Amino acid sequence: MTSSHLPAADPCTLVIFGASGDLTRRLLVPALRNLRESRLLPDQFAVVGFSRSAPAIDDLPAFRHVHGAFDDAAAWARLKDEVVERMHAVGSQNLLFYLATAPEQFLNICERLAEVQLLSESDNGWRRVIVEKPFGTDLRTARQLNQRLTAVMREEQIFRIDHYLGKETVQNIVVFRFGNGIFEPIWNRRYVDHVQITVAETLGVEMRGEYYDQTGALRDMVPNHLFQLLTLSAMEPPSALDAGALHAEQVKVLEAIEPLAASDCGTTTVRGQYAAGQVDDATVRGYRDEPKVDAASTTETFAAFRIAVDNWRWAGVPFYLRTGKRLRGKKSEVAIHFRQPPLALFRQASMAPPEPNQLVISIQPEEVIKLKIAAKVPGPELTASPVDLRFNYADYFGVEPQTGYETLLYDAMTGDRSLFKRADVVEAGWGVVDPIVTAWAAGSCTLETYQAGSDGPDAAAQLLTRDGRRWRPL
Ligand code: BG6
């Protein structure tokens, strides 16, 4: 995040719940450090951590820690005293709470915060809460959580985070689409054949077996990360680049998705689980042998499906989404596949037809945008070959140390909610995913096995070949 013309964020105290956890250590602390180096943290700033074990923060200036469990009244009293003291020291009533905890704690913590009067805003200070994912486990629980959170604070105080929105290339989808006049006229059913959205990982479930085995690939990745990519790629131009206008357009996309009928789930969705295999030259175990995973688990580690965004822009254009762990490569991308141009000319010239154009927005492993076009291969023979017009972020802007959380923390401190999820965006996402979860639970889609290090189950390839298409390679 470059500091070129941004002012430092508002003076405030950041309170981290779950200060001993992995998220705090791996992402929040480095992000705060990067923000400080970019001069985007205010001078009047303090951090208070709250956790049962030793904090994962050691070298942040102005850091205090409160030991205790989230259900311990005495610990809450100590936390309140510490926070009040910090507010005086900082000279500001602004408080940002970060819930870097297990999701079961979200509501409990917010209700406690309300009880100890730390959520009430005044003219002298704002109070904001960053809530991590997963936000609910289905539409019902997400709705319930939304209702109960808004019983203790205003929607505008809730910042539901999705770390995909902290990624520059994801934010760039909006600038790319609406800041360049040449793409928007072809960004629709007249020119687009289909869209592929992929978030593939080589990692397994690591030490998160307990959470993952109850969650699965679909709920872990789709209503949040994949749907952010989908909605930003498919939405109409917003009336402004502010949170309200962006969220309104994102919700419309999700609401336009045709609900999947349980009877179609066998043909339009694929679920898979990895078996042992080779990833990046290392032998890795199968999912059922991972720590804290049930040895007979039927949880999916791979999900793929086809959806229809049934609106004026996209009617008839299939969107294929896939995500999985222990796949051949790490790759997050949105690929717009354009229609085939008329081929008569090439038939007359007896040459193989050029491949249709593809526009690929790559988020990981490289931040790249490329447009695949056909070019004549040099020489006397008339043949075409696909070549890439390629823009790599690093070539133009250099690469800064980034966790993706810098922008999100800064935005929360300045009150910009554009990169956070509004309640209805979250609910609309679950609304699309729930019927698939239900159909899968009812056994309407076989759990396929795929070898670790592969492209996923064969059934995922068939999902596209049946439609005369194929996935981009991983
Ligand atoms: C998290 C999921 O939200 O996103 C993880 O819980 C997943 O299972 C991770 O590994 C992927 O994030 P990234 O930024 O590595 O693509």
Image (cartoon, rainbow, N blue to C red):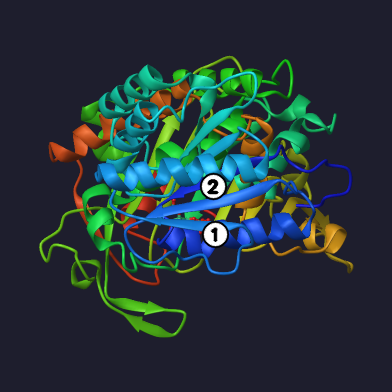
**Is residue 132 at all visible to an observer of this figure?**
no
In percent of width and height, residue 424 lies at 45, 20
Q: Callout 2 environment at 10 Å: few (<14), some (14 to 19), or many (20+)?
A: some
What is the spatial separation of the Cα atoms under label 2 and label 1, in whole angstroms? Answer: 10 Å
Name the residue rendered at 24%, 44% in the picture: 71
Quick one: 439 or 132, which is closer to the camera?
132
Q: Of tags 2 and 1, which is closer to the observer?
A: 1
- The disc label shown at residue 152, or none: none
Secondary structure at badge 1 equals helix
In percent of width and height, residue 259 lies at 34, 22
User: Residue 52 is drawn in which quadrant?
Assistant: bottom left
Q: Is residue 20 left or right of residue 346?
A: left
Q: Amino acid at mark 1?
A: Leu
In percent of width and height, residue 290 lies at 23, 71
Q: Amino acid at mark 2?
A: His
Q: Which residue is mark 2?
A: 163
> Badges 2 and 1: C-beta atoms under 8 Å apart?
yes
**Is residue 85 at all visible to an observer of this figure?**
yes
Establish if 158 lies above or below 349.
above
Report the residue that reaches farthest toward the left. 296
Establish if 165 lies above or below 23.
above
In percent of width and height, residue 232 lies at 61, 33
Ligand 1 contact, mark 2 (Cβ < 8 Å): yes
Name the residue rendered at 29%, 23% in the picture: 144
Name the residue rendered at 56%, 58% in the picture: 63
- The disc label shown at residue 27, or none: 1
